[in-house]
Amino acid sequence: LIGKNLEDGSLIKEFEASHGTVADLWQTHLAGQPTSMNPLGMVEALLGAMNHSADLTEQKEKSAAATEQRKELLEFTSTLRTALHNTFRYGQGTRDMAGPAGLTTEQFIDKVAWRLGRYLVAIRDDVEQQDMVSAPMRSFRRNYNVDKVALQQLFDEYDRDKTGTITITELENMLVTLGVAPM
């Protein structure tokens, strides 16, 4: 993506986007087959172009409205970038990056859109962004040493109907008996 300023001919900006893979994938998409493209380079280029466009508009117009529009656009592109990168970070990447278990291009876009929507709502409502990252499983700790036999016996004791699951009533009875029920 490259351009020149119409007024003075100066170079606007150049961003590295993608390569021939996009054209190949477009043909695959048109044939109705699923695709899986790593969109990071292209999206980063588009976000950079959007940010640069906002900078140029603010410089040219020198108005409070242009400054506010730039601020809003930069907030949006930053939030989109976070949603995009977090989607990969949470193991929801495209197949070309994550292997056969990865998402198709369309599934990935849907996932990023879902995450972006959550982040934008959080910003709009002046709520701090919180990613739903769970704590690591304690079983990965070096000093983890749970007695599995005792645990199974405890489970069996409170699984009164012997279904292999504990109902909410059975859980309630267990927590009360153990003295850890929220009261």
Image (tube, helix red, strand yellow):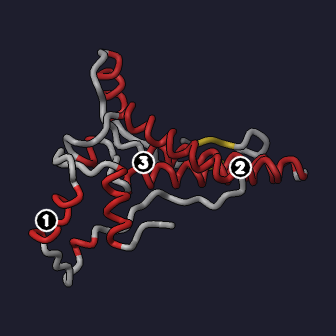
Q: Is residue 18 above or below residue 160?
A: above
Q: Residue at x 41, y 50 (%)?
A: 87
Q: Is residue 172 above or below residue 69?
A: below
Check disc 3 and report its element: helix, strand or loop.
helix
Which of these two is toward me, 137 or 38? 137
Helix, strand or loop at mark 2: helix
Q: Position of residue 39 (x, y in %)?
A: 41, 42
Which percent across, then down, holds residue 144?
20, 79
Q: Amino acid at mark 2?
A: Arg
Q: Residue furthest top?
A: 31
- For residue 40, the mark is 3
Q: Quadrant of residue 17?
A: top left
Q: Across the whole image, how many numbered discs are drawn on residues? A: 3
> Amino acid under label 1?
Gln
For disc 2, the marked residue is 124
> Vertically, is 88 above or below 107?
below
Are dots 1 and 3 in contact, CB under 8 Å? no
Disc 2/disc 1 C-alpha distance (Å): 50 Å
Q: 59 or 177: which is nearer to us?
A: 177
Badge 3: residue crowd in 10 Å (few <14, some 14–19, many ≥20): some
